[in-house]
Amino acid sequence: MSATRVFAARLAGCSVFDPAGDKVGRVRDVLVVYRSSEAPRVVGFIVEVPGKRRVFLSVGRVTSIGSGQIIATGLINLRRFEQRGGEVRVIAELIGRQVGLVDGSGQATIEDVAIEETGLGEWEVTQLFCRRPRTGTSPFAKGATVFVKWDDVVEKKAKSGEAQSATQLVATYADLQPADLANAMLDLPEQRMHEVAEELSDERLADVLEEMSEDEQVDILNQLDDERAADVLDQMQPDDAADLIAHLGDERGETLLELMDPEEAEDVRFLLSYAPDTAGGLMTTEPIIVSADATVAEGLALIRRHELAPALGAAICVTLPPYEAPTGRFLGMVHFQRMLRYPPNERLGTLLDPSLEPVQGTTSAAEVSRILASYNLVSVPVVDENHRLVGVVTIDDVLDYLLPDDWRSTDSQPEPALTAPTATPGRRTRNGTR
């Protein structure tokens, strides 16, 4: 059953289906246009289809909205979405704005926007869910909420240098995976993207930056003050942090290294000592490292840690003490599948893979790629001239090196053939004008 009124924030991430029941994509935003004397009119939805491509779905092609899904009719034009003048994205640009209440009772912040069907294929903004400023001094206190009509508010113009609140937008994005959040942020206007970056926690922003290209990382980091930038770098994987610092100017890079946690900075400086196209330049310095006396049960417990990347959890490194890179002499690796075949009390020193040879830090990235491909590995250990373990190169590190610099950008993907649009009488499509 189709709803006659829905809230935009609840549509974010909803699946879009065609009449046959096949999933087309997911809603990422609602697109509206302002009108001089009436509430904004909904013109369509921004939908993410396979390949992380954002396309436009006209509201005239939507036959049903409800139960967490949207059903569309006809074929969807797969041309990449481009925002036009006068169009406003509700989730990315409208939610979080401050408005004044025309009854003179003060200001409020938009937390959600209700759209309602006013006729066949016609939707418009009818209500705003707003929150007034908090009145108590407690950090847990929240302002009162209020539902108001569009005509009952006046948008507040930000003062010079005053950033528009991005708190509610960040809350809307809370359930997105880092890669999806990175794509969503890059789809925002530049100023709005920087506002969202400021609002994210250090750990969340670090995860997002790791999913962006170096140029995009530098752009965001340059908008942060040195203290915040250093805190974010502390939360990144050392190899990713090293890659990012290498793309900054020498002066700022050194400043940030001085502000970082000493142990984290030491790892980053160590990685920066290697050329970027070598095993040392690609590796991470934080693999799982244990002694030969560690048991299968202990090894599996280390692998179960939720924050551990899958590629790092595929194998455990066994060395002599100390057990932090650079370690004592490297003894070998134990793959997790091999551990599953033995009892919990079995010593890992007896399960080493004798066929896996480590590489030197100076080994070329091309040679590391060949080894991973030839032996169907997801990681390879890296040792120094004294055969001490200094890190591991994982398959995702190699893929980052082999793929084009702009592989994360959807713009680098080939343009798909357009499906034939099914025109709605009296409504123009994105092939021409609306």
Image (cartoon, helix red, strand yellow):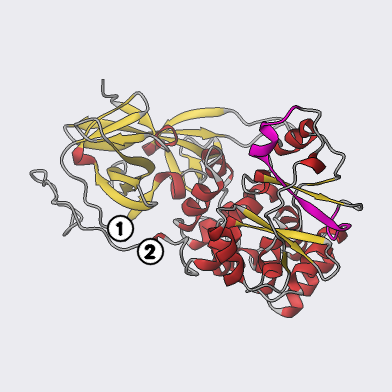
Q: Are marks 1 and 2 in contact (CB under 8 Å)?
A: yes
Q: Which residues are magenta?
A: 324-343
Estimate the x, y position of residue 118 in percent, counting from the top left. 23, 31
Q: Does 368 sit above or below residue 147? A: below
Mark 1 or mark 2: whose residue is earlier in sequence: 1
Q: Does 243 sit above or below residue 263? A: below
Please report the residue visible at 53 percent of the width from the left and 57 percent of the height from the top. Answer: 193
Q: Say left or right for 18 vs 290.
A: left
- Residue type at tag 2: Asp
Q: Residue 268 is drawn in which quadrant?
A: bottom right
Q: How many marks?
A: 2
Of the numbered discs in the image, which one, if any, rests on residue 411?
2
Estimate the x, y position of residue 15 in percent, counting from the top left. 35, 35
Q: Say left or right for 116 vs 298.
A: left
Q: Is residue 104 magenta?
A: no
The label nearer to you, 1 versus 2, is 2
Q: Residues within 10 Å of mark 2 (few under 14, many from 20)?
A: few
Q: Quadrant of the N terminus?
A: top left
Estimate the x, y position of residue 9 in percent, counting from the top left. 44, 36
Estimate the x, y position of residue 186 in percent, counting from the top left. 48, 58
Q: Secondary structure at mark 2?
A: helix
Q: Residue 45 is drawn in which quadrant?
A: top left
Of the numbered discs in the image, which one, if any, rests on residue 283?
none
Please report the residue visible at 65 percent of the width from the left and 44 percent of the height from the top. Answer: 314
